[in-house]
Image (tube, rainbow, N blue to C red):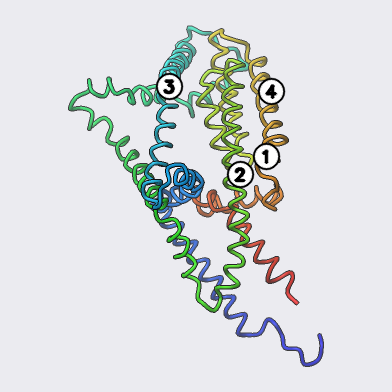
Amino acid sequence: MAEGKPLYWNTDRIMWLLLGVLLAAGILWLIYYLRDALLPFFVACVVAYLLQPLVALNRRWFHLKGRAVASVLTAVEVTLVIGAVVWLALPSVSSQLDELGAILSDVSSGRIELPPSYRSAMKFINKYFDPGYFSRLVSSIRIEELLRRGTSLLEESAEVLLHVLAWLLTLIYVLFILIDYPQIVKGFQMIVPQKYRPKAMAVVNDIKNGMNHYFRGQGIVALFAMVFYCIGFLIVGLPLAVPMGLLVGILYMIPYFQYVTLIPVAGLCLVYSLGGGFEFLPELGKCCLVYVVSQCICDYVITPHVMGRELGLNPAIILLSLSVWGSLLGIIGMIIALPVTALIMSYYARYISNRT
C-alpha cells in the first residue's frame, strides 16, 4: 500500500454498504411477502414490455398521435389472436382428453391389462395428472353448456371466476402500463437521488439495451419455436400436439425450461400406447426427434439472426440465477432473475473490477 493513500473501505463506506445490504434484504422480504398481490403486476409489466413494438407499429400504421388508442388496439389484436387459437383448438383438445380419460379408466378397471414395466409410470400419471379434471375444465368453456347450467353456474364456477378476475386484473394492468409506458420509465428514473442518478442511469441504460435485445429477441425465437413444435408434434401424431407445442413455446422464454415438457410428452405417449394407437418407444423417439430438429433450427438458424449476440451470461450463470431467484421469490423471481443478475454483473464490472 502506498504511503499516505487513504483506505477505500473506511468506516463510512462500510456503514453505507451495510445499510445498502439491509435495504436490499428488506425489499426482497417485502416482495416475497406481497408476492401473490405483485404477481399480476409483474406479469403485466413483462407483457407490456414485450408489446411495446406492436404499439409503435400500430401508431405508425394508423397515424395515431397518442398512445391510448394504439394500446387498446394492440390489446384487442392480441386478444383476438389468442381467442382464435383457443376456439380452433378447443374441440380437438376436448375429444383427445376424453379419449385419454377413457384409456386410464379402462386401465384402472382392468379392461386393459397393464404390462409390469408400465405400472410405476401409470401410478405417477394417476397421481399427478387427472385427465378428467382437464376435460371437464375444457368442456366448461363451451358457451352452450354454460347457458344450460342456469342458476347453478355461479356456485359451480366460483373458483374459476376468481381466477378469471385475477387474470382480468392483469389485463387491466397491461393496458394502463402500455398507455403510460414512457411516463412510468421516467418515474423510475426520478426515484434515484439526483446525486447518484448519472452513475445509476449508466448502469440502467446498459441493462436496458441488453434486456431490449434479450426479451424481445427471445420472444420472437419462442414464437418460432412454438410453431415448429406444434407442426412437429402434429406430424408425428402426438395427442394434444397443439397444447404441448404452445406450452413448449411459452416455457422457451425461460432458458432451458422447454425440456421440462419431455415429462408430459412421455406420459402422453405411454398412455396412448396402452390404447393401441401406437407403440410407446417409437412414438417417444419421434417426439425426441422433434425436440432435436426444432432446437437445432432455433439455436443455429433463428437465434443468430434474431438475437445477433447473447445477453452475456453463460448457461451456468443463467441456471444459477433462475434457481436462486426462483427459490427466493417464486414466479416473480423467475421473471426478474436475468435482469437482476445482469444488473449486478454490470455494476460489478463498471464500478468494482475496473476501479482504480
Residue 185 position, x and y percent, is: 47, 61
Q: Which residue is mark 1?
A: 303
Q: Amino acid at mark 2?
A: Gly
Q: Is residue 325 above or below residue 93?
A: below
Q: CA distance from mark 3 to mark 2?
A: 28 Å
Residue count near mark 4 (Cα–Cα under 10 Å), binned few <14, some 14–19, many ≥20: some
Q: Residue furthest front?
A: 63
Q: Which residue is more in the foreground, 326 or 142? A: 142
Q: Earlier in the sequence, mark 2 or mark 4?
A: 2
Dot 4: element:
helix
Instruction: Determine whether label 1 and label 2 are within 8 Å by CB.
Output: yes
- Residue hosting label 3: 88
- In primary-sequence order, the first of circles 3 and 2 is 3
Image spot of residue 123 (x, y percent): 52, 23
Instruction: Name the residue tied to disc 2.
Output: 217
Between tags 4 and 1, which lies in front? 1
Q: Which residue is mark 4?
A: 289
- Classify residue 215 as left or right of residue 189: right
The crowding category of the residue bearing disc 2, from other C-alpha atoms within 10 Å (few below 14, some 14 to 19, many at least 20), is: many
Q: What is the distance, in whole Å, between disc 1 and disc 2 at their CAs?
A: 8 Å
What distance separates the C-alpha of mark 1 from that of mark 3? Answer: 29 Å
Q: Amino acid at mark 1?
A: Thr
- Tell me the distance, in whole angstroms, between the alpha carbons under discs 4 and 1: 20 Å
Q: Is residue 326 above or below residue 199?
A: above
Query: What is the secondary structure assignment of the residue under circle 1?
Result: helix
Which quadrant: the C terminus? bottom right
Badge 3 crowding class, 10 Å Cα cut-off, few under 14, some 14 to 19, many 20 or more, is few
Q: In the visual, does 153 lie left or right of 286?
A: left
User: Which label sits on residue 288?
Assistant: none
Q: Residues within 10 Å of mark 1 (few under 14, many from 20)?
A: many
